[in-house]
Image (cartoon, helix red, strand yellow):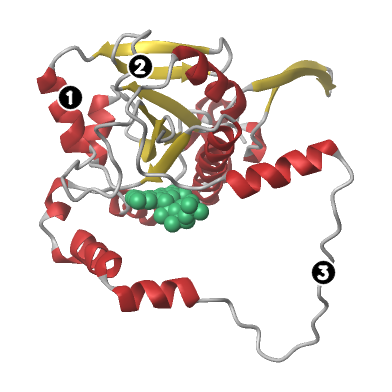
Amino acid sequence: MTREEQLNVLSAHQLSEHTLDFLNSIKFKKYDKESRDKFKRMAYINNSPEMMKKIMDAKYEMGFCETYVLQSIPFSSQKARCLAELNQERKSVRRFGNDPINLNQVSAFFNLFYTVTGQEEFDFKGVSLTQMKRNIASGGSLYPTEIYFVNHRITELPLGVYHYNVFTFSLELIRALPTAAEWDFFYEIIMKADSSSIDFDQASAFVIFSSVFNKQSFKYQDFGVALSLVEVGEFIHAAYLALAALELRGCAFGGFLSKEMHQFLALKNSLHQPLFCMAIGDQLK
Ligand SMILES: Cc1cc2nc3c(=O)[nH]c(=O)nc-3n(C[C@H](O)[C@H](O)[C@H](O)COP(=O)(O)O)c2cc1C
């Protein structure tokens, strides 16, 4: 690699046209709402008991092969028992209690969901490096995922949209949303409707999972997109486990207008894509 290439390496995304097309094709667009292909297909499947039965019954079949049944041995360590309990508790809940969660609960959520867990100093070929350890693994330690938070009902914080800073453990207010018109724009983005499976009105807040794709693709090219999407999955799972640990409720969803969400979060880079969202709130009492 030439010196000039080295200098440009961080800014060049290195994605092929196919992959850029793919990233565009997975965005929900305004016109998709009326299209037969996307939402009508999903709504049909969601409303069809026959289809739902097929989905619930579907199992990966290996055909004939020798089988060794694994043993369910009681866990000997407290940590293993805790994880087993969290796994039991983790679920998607689409209805929330009337009262919004409070700032302590939000803080505890972020502390468990995505956090710096330590710092490691090491020498790499004579260069001293510091790695901030986090509870989430990341291909190449590049961490393309960025987390946003929309405060919908929490009274101790201004209502509005925030960026979560994992290093300073703080929420950075991007824009307060004091007016009903601004919330209407957000509801339009998340396609809130009477028929929505998730009770958006009662949700205390929304967590938005976004990825800066060029952060991994500059190194791994197209494969970087696979790494980035996998990582967002890790984050979603970590959020589910954090909610389970705190006896809070939530449900992930992917149906939102991508371009409008990009604008709503004030993202600057076109390869910084909002991918999933999670409505969170208190349990029904
Ligand atoms: C990435 C992702 C997107 C999801 N999108 C939706 C959604 O749009 N609407 C919804 O009601 N549930 C959504 N879910 C929740 C799934 O339906 C749920 O995880 C699945 O039914 C299994 O149920 P459980 O999470 O309670 O175990 C989503 C879950 C994930 C992980």
- The disc labelled 3 sits on which kind of residue? Leu
Q: Secondary structure at mark 3?
A: loop
- The disc labelled 2 sits on which kind of residue? Ile
Give residue 70's mark. 3
- The disc labelled 1 sits on which kind of residue? Trp
Residue occupying image coordinates x 23% and y 67%: 41
Q: Secondary structure at mark 1?
A: helix
**Res 9 visible:** yes
Out of 37 and 104, give the one closest to the viewer: 104
Count neighbours of disc 2 (C-alpha within 10 A) and say few if under 14, some if 14 to 19, many if 20 or more.
Answer: many
Q: Quarter-wise, where is residue 140 in the image?
A: top right
The residue indicated by pointer 2 is 154
Image quadrant containing the N terminus: top right
Q: Position of residue 65 (x, y in %)?
A: 76, 88
Give residue 183's mark. 1
Q: Vertically, is 29 above or below 154? A: below
